[in-house]
Image: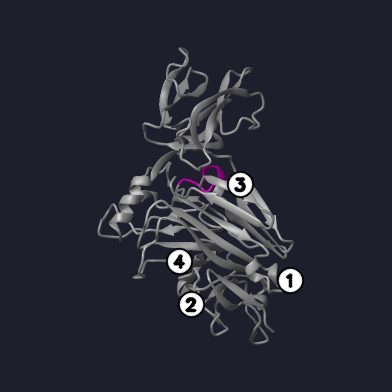
Amino acid sequence: MSQRNFQNLSSMALRCNVLWRVNVSGDRMSTKSSAEAHRFDTEATTFYIPAEPGTDRMPLYRMFNGRDHMDSINVNESPHYQCELTLGYPWREHAGPRGTNVGHLKRLYNEATYDHALVSRVNEPLRGYRADFDMPVLGYPRLGGAKLLPISNGEIEIKSNEMAGGQVWEWHWNGRQFLETADFGRGIQSSLSIPMPSLADPAVSDPSLPTEGGGFSRQSVEPLHLQGSPVVNLHNEGFRQVSRAVPLEWQNHLFGCETDQIIAYPEFVIGKNLIFNDERTVHLSTEHRKRIVTYETVFYSPFEMDDVAIEIPTAYLKPDFNSFWRYDAENATLTRMPSHSEYRGAGGVILATQEPHDYAMGVYGSPPSMGGSVTYFNLLDFTNHGLPTVKWRAAYSLADGEPGTFGSGEHVFCTQIVTGTLVECGQHHGRVVSLRCALRRNCIAFEIRA
């Protein structure tokens, strides 16, 4: 465990309040309390805003006149309203985190009901309300439920969720959706693991987990109470999908974080480049190229770290993908594996449905010693723990005695994800037909063989 990592993370970890908008018998009110949000009709999560004051921030007050709640940055805005509580401390205009998708806090007003409401965008469909005031303060805007951006090559369709850091939320092939997404920690995404001293016992390591999709919610699995990572950008460029996000901490207790709060890392950026028809697979037939998606995990760190691992990426699949395999590219062998296992070397791991293995998904890469990105692969089964999901992981690691440091700046890690039947992901009549590695820097090129 590195004291340097602990000091760096602690200095940049930003404690934020979650703002929910609830409807209290026609009075729309903002709250930072999940208990209060559960007590009323929750309409939306509107913003994440810093929980503590700073020179670059202003307080946001919840005001009340006996009938209407109104959010304001001026405690004396109206003599008819009294301050109930401070909701948090949004950034002053022009003082928000650089390179991050922050937005103005927007207030609407309904002249017929004399009611105010806080929204993250003016065009939110609240009937009878009009724009009242764009406050000169900023927060991370939230948009409600899932908002998916699709991309397809005609064979595979992938949808990424803007509300969950831009992580891959759905993966469709041959009429089947592969991924399990009960919370924002699943789907396909990346997460860091950085050993930290436990608050209960500083001699014990308890890893910090900055996560692309979002933070852990102990209160609910309802969509409006899931805490997704703020998206920096999410867009398509032809047969390429790009996403970047500000990761949220999965282990909030490491920072003494209250249940209703999140820990964001505004200086970290984590995301992906999904690439169809990648030039690294140009030697394949069109049919086989369509089954392969290059997945580049992109991570930016403002400081150097050691003793760290990053998933590049991980995938949570539905529980019937319970046939576990590894592919050894150097020896061209496919081997059935236990449900909890690790593999090191060039090749990859596969999750498939049971015989006849009609559906399968594999992740492939080569180790850094061969110019690639993957230190190890894992196969994991959570169904015995009451969670309806199984998982594969490709990881880059400097932990477990691996030498070296993880430098500051941008890092790009390359793997390939292959979708098909197990025949197309491994063997046919006892012979390997696909995914023999041609080891190249930061990638695997594939050769389909009969």
The magenta stretch spans residue 129: no
Q: Alpha carbon of mark 1 to alpha carbon of mark 2: how far?
A: 27 Å
Sequence order check, earlier mark of 1 and 2: 1
Q: x, y (%) of residue 292? A: 65, 68
SS for tag 3? Answer: loop
Q: What is the span of residues highlighted in magenta in the rendered image?
A: 219-227
Vertical arrangement, residue 324 with respect to residue 251, above or below: below
Q: Is residue 172 left or right of residue 164?
A: right
- Mark 1 belongs to which amino acid? Glu
Q: x, y (%) of residue 37? A: 50, 36
**Residue pictured at 41% horizontal, 55% vertical:** 408
- Mark 4 belongs to which amino acid? Tyr
SS for tag 2? Answer: loop
Sequence order check, earlier mark of 4 and 3: 3
- The answer to whether residue 355 is seen in the rendering is no
How dense is the environment of label 2, judged by Cα within 10 Å: few (below 14), some, or many (20 and up)?
some
- Mark 2 belongs to which amino acid? Gly
Dots 4 and 3: beta carbons under 8 Å? Answer: no
In this rendering, the label closer to the viewer, 3 or 1: 1
Sequence order check, earlier mark of 2 and 4: 2
**Residue pictured at 35% horizontal, 69% vertical:** 403
Residue at the top extreme, as displayed:
79
Mark 2 — residue?
Answer: 345
How many numbered circles does the render carry?
Answer: 4
On residue 287, the disc is 1
Dots 4 and 1: beta carbons under 8 Å? Answer: no
On residue 34, the disc is none
SS for tag 4? Answer: strand
Q: Alpha carbon of mark 4 to alpha carbon of mark 1: how far?
A: 30 Å
